[in-house]
Image: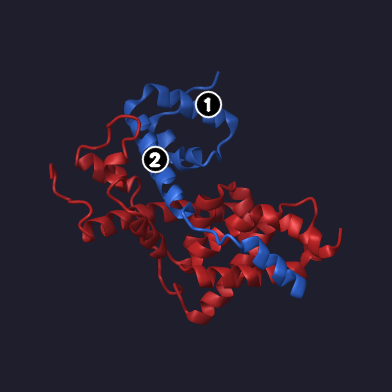
Chain colours: A red, B blue
């Protein structure tokens, strides 16, 4: 097998999830394709640094993420936002206040069914890049913390803390956006 | 047999439990608690549903039908 074919056989099982990841990082199809193509070229040129017995997905997503950071810094996007610590179980508490937490197999349904895809996307976009990359990678790939740590070149403990904080902040943003957009009323029994 | 966790111990581990990042012993202890605690079980199911909902929404990205062809052509030209 020639080098290009070998590389493509490694990439192919992961290219769709990589595209989705790039799309969620950049926010649109054109930028996602540009980012993915840049990352593919960089990875192809650096394939000799890939250890065959290691995780190709994590290795490739690290290259893609680093490329995103580079472009993001150039565009000065999301770089100065801080992430205040949010309360635990924020949506649960809001749902409990409205009396929705014990409803059948999906106690979150009464809240979530009112939140559309745009609200979820916008809530993710409110996170700073460091938290957004961890959250999107986690939600899209379901990779274990260990692989995310490799992909983002950060310690596992940092993956855990960023993911947990991002998740809490995401719940606050989801609620605030849904209320602001009139999707959910904060009034009890409404 | 290990002791089931308390509500506080489960709360501390809830996110890692959701992410399947606990040891087998810790998972068993959380499972044992959730089977007998309506409050923690409700919180867990709520959080699990929120996670699933967000993941499903984020995954709804239309992938270009020619993605493979475009990447392959680009690599050929590289």
Q: Point out residue A139 in the picture as x, y percentages from the top left corner.
A: 50, 51
Give the residue at the far right of this rendering: A1
Residue density around tag 2, few if under 14, some if 14–19, many if 20 or more, within 10 Å: some
Secondary structure category for the residue under label 2: helix
Q: Is residue A130 visible?
A: no
Tell me which corner region of the image, top left, top right, bottom left or bottom right, holds residue A180: bottom left
Tell me the mark number nearer the camera, choosing from 1 and 2. 2
Q: Point out residue A135 in the picture as x, y percentages from the top left corner.
A: 49, 55
Judging from the image, mark 1 belongs to the subunit labelled B
Of the numbered discs 1 and 2, the one sitting upstream in the chain is 1
Nearest to the observer: residue B27 or residue A148:
A148
Horizontal side of A31 relative to A100 (left or right) equals: right
Residue tagged 1 = B28
Q: Point out residue B7 in the picture as x, y percentages from the top left corner.
A: 38, 31
Residue found at x 52% / y 61%: A133
Secondary structure category for the residue under label 1: helix
Look at the image and tell me in which quarter the C terminus of chain A lies.
top left
Nearest to the observer: residue A128 or residue A72:
A72
Residue tagged 2 = B49
- Mark number, residue A46: none
Tell me which corner region of the image, top left, top right, bottom left or bottom right, holds residue A101: top left
Tell me which corner region of the image, top left, top right, bottom left or bottom right, holds residue A64: bottom right
In this rendering, the answer to whether A134 lies above or below A143 is: below
């Amino acid at each position: 097998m020639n080098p290009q074919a070998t590389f493509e056989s490694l990439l192919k099982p992961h290219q769709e999830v990589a595209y989705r990841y790039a799309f969620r990082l950049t926010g649109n199809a054109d930028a996602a394709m540009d980012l993915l193509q840049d990352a593919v070229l960089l990875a192809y040129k650096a394939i000799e640094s890939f250890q065959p017995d290691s995780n190709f997905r994590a290795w490739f997503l690290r290259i893609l993420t680093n490329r995103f950071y580079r472009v993001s810094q150039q565009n000065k996007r999301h770089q100065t936002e801080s992430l205040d610590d949010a309360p635990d179980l924020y949506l649960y508490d809001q749902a409990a206040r409205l009396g929705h937490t014990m409803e059948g197999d999906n106690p979150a349904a009464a809240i979530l069914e009112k939140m559309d895809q745009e609200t979820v996307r916008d809530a993710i976009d409110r996170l700073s890049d460091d938290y957004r990359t961890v959250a999107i990678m986690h939600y899209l790939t379901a990779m274990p913390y260990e692989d995310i740590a490799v992909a983002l070149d950060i310690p596992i403990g940092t993956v855990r803390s960023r993911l947990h904080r991002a998740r809490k902040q995401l719940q606050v943003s989801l609620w605030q956006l849904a209320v602001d957009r009139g999707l959910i009323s904060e009034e009890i029994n409404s | 047999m290990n002791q089931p966790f308390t509500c506080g111990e489960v709360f501390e581990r809830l996110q890692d439990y959701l992410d399947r990042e606990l040891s087998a012993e810790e998972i068993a202890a959380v499972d044992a608690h959730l089977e007998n605690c309506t409050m923690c079980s409700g919180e867990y199911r709520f959080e699990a549903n929120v996670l699933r909902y967000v993941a499903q929404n984020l995954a709804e990205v239309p992938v270009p039908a020619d993605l493979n062809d475009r990447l392959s052509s680009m690599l050929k030209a590289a």
